[in-house]
Amino acid sequence: MVKDVISSMNVHMDKSIESLRKEYQKVRTGRASTSLLDDIKVDSYGTLSPLNQVATLAIPEARTITISPWDSKMIAPIEKAIMNSNLGLNPANDGKMIRLTLPPLTEERRKDIVKQLKRDAEDAKVALRNIRRDAIDQLKKLEKDKSISEDEQKRAEKEVQDFTNSHVAKVDEVLLHKEKEVMEV
C-alpha cells in the first residue's frame, strides 16, 4: 500500500516536471525552434489543423524558420494564423514558402522571459508540494485505518519528502538550463 502511494506520487511528480519542460520549449529564446509554432492552428479548408499538419517546418539558420505549405493555397491562411498567434513574428512570403526571422532579444526582454520562467518553475514546485501533501494525507489515512503502523507511516513520509526534494532539485535544474539558454547572446 505504501509503495502504491509513493509510486503514484512519483509518477505525478514526473508528469509535473515533464509539463514544465514542454512549457519551456514554447518559450522564445534567441534561437529558432519549431516548437514555437506547436500551438498554431491553421484554417485548412474549413477545419482548424495544427501548422505541422499542413506544412513542412525547417530551421535553415539559427534565427530563421521556414514553412513550406504542402498546398500553395495555404500560404495566406498560414500567414494569418502566425500573425494572430501573438508570437510577435512577421511572416515573409515568397510565393512558395514563408520565412520567419526571429529578432534578437533585448537584454530587457531576456530578463522578462527569465522572470516568467521563474514563475513557471515556482508553479511547478507548488504542484509538487500539492502532490506531496496528497501522498502524506493518504499515508495518514492508511495509518488511521490501521493498515500500516505509525513507524511505517513516518518512514514513508520521510521517503515522500526525499522524493519531493529530488524533484524540486530537478525543477531547479531545468530552470537553470533554460535560464542560461535565454540569457545567452
Image (cartoon, rainbow, N blue to C red):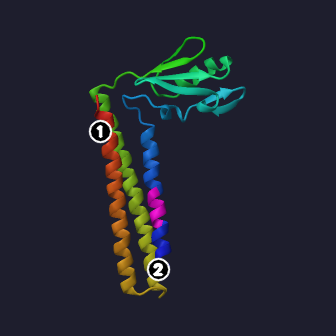
Category of crowding for the residue at label 2, using alpha-carbon neighbours closer than 10 angstroms: few (below 14), some (14–19), many (at least 20): some
The magenta stretch spans residue 103: no
- The answer to whether residue 84 shows anywhere in this view is no
Category of crowding for the residue at label 1, using alpha-carbon neighbours closer than 10 angstroms: few (below 14), some (14–19), many (at least 20): few
Left or right: where 96 falls relative to 181: right
Residue 99 image position (x, y, % from top left): 50, 18
Give the structural element (helix, strand or loop) at label 2: helix
Residue 137 image position (x, y, % from top left): 44, 73
Q: Quadrant of the C terminus?
A: top left
Above-or-below relation of 21 to 46: below
Left or right: where 56 falls relative to 4: right
Q: Which residues are magenta?
A: 9-14
Residue lying at the far right of the rendered structure: 45
| Disc 1 versus disc 2: nearer the observer | 1
What amino acid type should be assigned to the residue bearing mark 2? Lys
What amino acid type should be assigned to the residue bearing mark 1? Lys
Residue 182 image position (x, y, % from top left): 33, 34
Mark 1 or mark 2: which comes first in sequence? 2
Give the structural element (helix, strand or loop) at label 1: helix
Residue toward you, 117 or 62: 62
User: Which picture quadrant has residue 133?
Assistant: bottom left
The magenta stretch spans residue 10: yes
- List the residue tagged with mark 2: 141
User: Which picture quadrant has residue 13?
Assistant: bottom left
Q: Label 1 to label 2, Cα distance in Å?
A: 43 Å
What label sits on residue 101 in the rendered view? none
What predominant SS class does the magenta segment belong to?
helix
- List the residue tagged with mark 1: 180
Residue lying at the far top of the rendered structure: 94
For the point 45% across and 24% down, the residue is: 88
For the point 40% across and 66% down, the residue is: 132
